[in-house]
Structure formats: structure tokens, C-alpha cells
Amino acid sequence: MIDPMIADCDFDTYTKMIADFTNTDLIPTENEMVEAGEVPARILDSMAALGLFGISIPRAYGGLELTMEQQVGLTFEFTRASCVYRSRFSTVIGLCSQAILEHGTEAQRRRLLPAMAAGELVTAFALTEEAAGSDAAHLRTTARREGDVYVLNGGKRYITNAAWADAFVVFARTDDSDPGAGGISAFVVDASTPGITTALPSMMNGHAEAPVAEIRFDDVEVPCTDLLGGSEGSGLTMALRGINHARLHVAATCVGQATRMLEETVAHVTRRQQFGGPLADLGAVQATLGASFAEMEAARALVVQSAREFDRGAIPRHRIAAAKLYSSEMASRVADRCVQLLGGEGIVGPNPVPRMWRDVRALRIYEGSSPVHERNLAKAMIRQVTIDGTLPDSFRA
Ligand SMILES: Cc1cc2nc3c(=O)[nH]c(=O)nc-3n(C[C@H](O)[C@H](O)[C@H](O)COP(=O)(O)OP(=O)(O)OC[C@H]3O[C@@H](n4cnc5c(N)ncnc54)[C@H](O)[C@@H]3O)c2cc1C
């Protein structure tokens, strides 16, 4: 439950509170979390009390109703800590709640969103399948209508939070005659429904403390009232609403991660003496640090600009894709340089940077992999220039 005094805070006070929580709780708990292989329960309770599960949900449904600019500003702060913490509430604040908010019926919004905002109903977003990753429109899980229920069959993989979620937003094919996006619908499925099984992977390379899971649906009966929005055929549009929100949060996460890695690395090169002085005195080291800072700030500016446009109403999906593409590539570049500057400590011992280097690698794969964003942006540019000579989401439009 969100601490009632949080709802009365002004945003600057709230940001300070989250920054303090990051410094006094999240960062100092990282090693304990890695050893335990999971986010400690007391940290999850604090995240819920601080309202982190509700930042994107309107006050009418129990959330904090922050603007997107405020959400990314806050993300810059709490993702100075391991991005695994964010994973635990990311599927609620971005992917699932936004699809429900924009496309759910009023009854679905009232039933689900207040519990989600309070951190009491954890949802997972079940789109990806073995045969449908980047090509999500060709997913194969089916939902067959039988009287008052839909019967779900199929499987999902790589689903964040699936192993402990209370409910899944599941995308399934309701119309076999349409093999593409038009045949897909979305359902909110209670995770305890008979016929559902989940399985954790045998190992994770990165994000190990917030592992993804597989979900199997074997003749799972879902009441028709749990068809999201009450109508079939626009499931992928609903998914994209959540995905666009989450993409911008991921881009902001990359900036938070780069900030921490640079803080740790600057401290290291200032301490570490070689050739009669600190590494920080070497021109090559300074050049690496300076270039990294400039790239991080470019990513931050792109994220904030996209967030401001988002808050004005129309979702700037191409600029969000550019922000996600650039920021995730930036975070990996910065991570690699930081590991290099740590020398052997980048490979041996407890320094957090190598763990973050491994974690940020995944950010170039989920919420659309970098090559897919490059392809989609190029296609959108070619299409738009052919129509009217401008670029998509153009500042000149
Ligand atoms: C840590 C993690 C968490 C995740 N969480 C979720 C979740 O909560 N819910 C969910 O539904 N999914 C989730 N995913 C799945 C994620 O969205 C997919 O992994 C991603 O869409 C890529 O699909 P794929 O892994 O099947 O790779 P593939 O589609 O097989 O692609 C592999 C690679 O091929 C290249 N490629 C593919 N298509 C193109 C193209 N058209 N043009 C150019 N290059 C291309 C890219 O380099 C791409 O990385 C998660 C994945 C990870 C790793």
C-alpha cells in the first residue's frame, strides 16, 4: 500500500525521497540481492510504500499520476541502482497498466489499477513466444471462444515477473483466418487459473535477480469479461500502447545506469595510481570519460524531449524508438569503457560496474532490439519523405 503521505508530496520532495532511498537502501542492498538471487522482500515492501508501482497510474485509480517527464526524471534517480529493482515494477507501471488504462473497460480499470498501483497485484506482460519474438504479430497462442469463456492454448517465453505475477496480460490469436496483427486480442488472466504453468530458466546472463519465465497455457478457461476492452482484434495496438510507455522508461534506465557506472569509474581512476599519479591524470582516460559523459547527456536530452512531447498528447513513437535505440547503445558503450578503465577490477572482485555491464546488455534486446528499431525508423523515414518530404515526428511538422 502507498504511504498516504506520499500522495501529498510535491514532486521535488518526492524525487529527493526516491534519490535518498536509492542511496541508503537500493545501492547498499545490491550485494545482498545478488547473493540471495532475488530482490529482498523488505525492499519490495518499501518500493510499494513509496508508490513506485503507481507512478504512471492516475489518482482516480489510486496512483500518483506523474507526468511522463516526471516519470523519466524519477527513473534517472532510482536506476543509479541495479536495473533489476526496476524490473520488479516495470511490467506494472509501463507495459500492463498503460494498456489497461487506455484500452480496458471502466470495470476492468476499477478492478485492476488500484491494486496494481499499491503493489498488491503484480502483472506480467505475456507477448513473446518461441516462434514470435521480434515478429510478435505472428504469435501462435490461441484463444477460442466457447460460450462465456475463451479457452487459451500455447506458450510464452522470456516473460519478466511471470514466476510471481498475480495476473498476466496475455496476447492470443482469436481469429485464425487472420495470421497477422488483426487476429490478435488481449486478455487479463488470473495467474492461478487451472492449466497455467510457469518455469524459470536454468540460468540468466544478466538480470539474474529478476529472471524471466516461460508460461504454458493448456486449455485455460478465461471469462469473456477478461477480454481486454471487451472487443477482439486490437490486441497488438493495446500491446504497443504499453510498449511505447515502457520503451521510454527503458531509455531513461540507460541514463541512470550510465550515471552510476561513470560515478564508480571516476572514483576508481581518481584513486588508482599508475605511472606516478592517478589514472585520472592521463589524457586518454579523460578523453574516454568526457566522451562518455557527452553521450549520456545526449541520451538524457532525447529522453526528456520525448517525454515532453508524450505529455503534450500524441505519443511520438519514432522519437521514443530513437531514444531507446540511442540510450541503450550508449549504456553498453559506456559500460564497456568503464570496465576497461577498471582494469582487472572490471573482471575480478565485487565492483558493481561489471555486473551492470552485463545487465545493460539486455536493454539492447528487449522493448525492441536495436536492429529492429533501426529498420523501423528507416522504413518510417522512407515512407514519410515519399508522402510529404518531412521526417517522422519532425520538429518542423
Ligand atoms: C531480460 C528480458 C526480459 C524480457 N521481458 C519480456 C516481457 O516481459 N514480455 C515479453 O513479452 N517479452 C519479453 N522479453 C522478450 C523480448 O521482447 C524479445 O527477446 C525480443 O523481442 C527479441 O525477440 P527474440 O529474443 O525472439 O529474438 P529474435 O526475434 O529471434 O531476434 C534475434 C536478433 O535478430 C535480429 N533481428 C530480428 N529481426 C530483425 C529485423 N527485422 N531486422 C534486423 N534485425 C533483426 C536482431 O539482432 C535481434 O536481436 C524479454 C527479453 C529479455 C532478454
Image: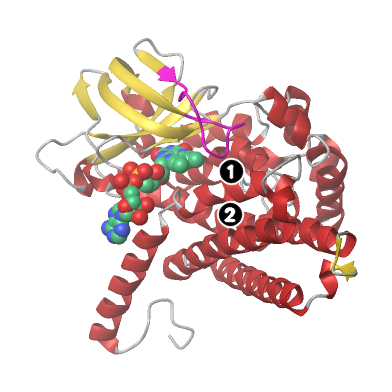
Residue 16 appears left or right of 352: right
Q: Are marks 2 and 1 in contact (CB under 8 Å)?
A: yes
The residue at 24%/84% (across/down) is 387
Residue 97 relative to residue 154: left or right = right
Q: Which mark is residue 310?
A: none
Residue 220 picture location, percent across and down: 31, 16
Q: In the rendered image of this protein, does residue 350 appear above or below residue 340?
A: above
Instruction: Check residue 249 in the rendering and tell me which mark sits there, or answer none.
Output: 2
| Residue 305 image-quadrant placement | bottom right
Residue 148: x and y in percent read 26, 18
Residue 93, numbered label: 1
Secondary structure beneath label 1: helix
Magenta-highlighted residues = 198-212
Compute the Cα span from label 2 to label 1: 9 Å
Which SS type dominates the magenta stretch? Answer: loop
Does 92 lie within the magenta span? no
**Res. 329 visible in picture:** yes
**Type of residue at label 1?**
Ile
Q: Nearer the viewer, residue 334 or 252?
A: 334
